Amino acid sequence: MFSDLVDDMGDMDGYSIEPKFFLDVPFVPTDDALIQAMFNMAGVNKKDVLYDLGAGDGRIVILAAQKYGIQAIGVELDPMRVSEAMEDAANARVEHLVDFIEADIFDKDVDISEASVVTLYLMDSVNVLLRPRLLNELRPGTRIVSHAFDMGDWQADEELDLGGITLYKWTIPAQVEGVWQCEGPNDEVYHLELEQQYQQVTGQVWVDDQPAVLVQASLNGSLLELSIQMASDQPVQQARLRFEYGAESPELEWL
Ligand SMILES: C[S@@+](CC[C@H](N)C(=O)[O-])C[C@H]1O[C@@H](n2cnc3c(N)ncnc32)[C@H](O)[C@@H]1O
């Protein structure tokens, strides 16, 4: 479907058209039912700011503004689509909530850091190229939902099959890799050495210089939940570390 269209773009009916810009994927719109499923999967709410990267005719952006009254921004390289999107936004009376930026989604001058939800309908290879931008520039906790395409070796947190079309959801993980020290409920010192691959966290823990077992680590946005056991005959303790954006060290909370 999609890849056939990409092959056809450079040579239509034998004419070789010199494009003024290069589109990584052609325009194929997401239908309204799927858009709603993407919103539901992302858990879009009134506090969100949504970015659609490769926004096409702006339908996701316009629907987000209409349904939730939120600020929504589309980034789109094709000027014809941008004009269409602006016209549709005016007809839908949401111009005050939306913005369309005529730019390449890989252009670093386009600031995407305000997003709390990002929607994508690109291609898996394009998602993989975009992945470092998303991981480095979006805040921990930002949800990403992709129509039909995955993100390479970054496993989705959720997948939803809708009649043969898969939607994928990821949450931007905080950067938790490193060496951390924090105090426990009885003034004991926890020393953590953590490694991270996307939202997967492994590592080692010492409590007052004694090695403990990190039974489980689960990272969701800026929240890292740890199950720690001092010895096999000891109860498993649950700790919650909050890695606030920009904070020097995490806040520890015991459950
Ligand atoms: C499959 S359409 C999806 C449109 C819309 N997001 C939707 O789901 O209805 C992909 C859009 O990305 C745009 N696009 C492709 N490469 C781009 C790039 N490098 N920067 C910005 N937009 C791009 C295309 O022009 C097209 O409108």
Image (cartoon, rainbow, N blue to C red):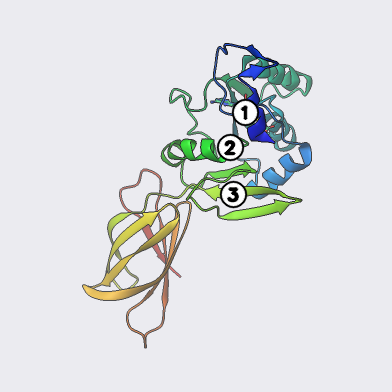
> In the displayed image of the protein, which residue is found farthest to the left?
209
Left or right: 195 as drawn, with respect to 16:
left
Give the mark nearer the N terminus: 1 vs 2. 1
Q: In which quarter of the image is residue 44?
A: top right
Pointer 1 residue: 6
Pointer 2 residue: 123
Q: Which of marks 3 and 1 is in front?
A: 1
Q: Quadrant of the N terminus?
A: top right
- Badge 2 amino acid: Met
- Badge 1 amino acid: Val
Residue 182 is situated, as x and y percent measured from the top left of the image, at: 29, 62
| 232 in relation to 246, above or below | below
Identify the residue at horizontal 47%, vertical 34% (top origin): 113
Observer-nearest of 177 and 44: 177
Residue 139 is situated, as x and y percent measured from the top left of the image, at: 46, 41
Q: Do the residues labelled 1 and 2 touch (CB within 8 Å)?
A: yes
Residue 117 at least partly seen: no
| 4 in relation to 171, above or below | above
Pointer 3 residue: 169
Residue 119 is situated, as x and y percent measured from the top left of the image, at: 61, 38
Residue 17 at least partly seen: yes
- Badge 3 amino acid: Lys
Q: In which quadrant of this rendering is ligand 1 seen?
A: top right
Identify the residue at horizontal 72%, vertical 22% (top origin): 89
Q: CA–CA distance between discs 1 and 2? A: 11 Å
Observer-nearest of 142 and 189: 142
Left or right: 10 as drawn, with respect to 34:
left
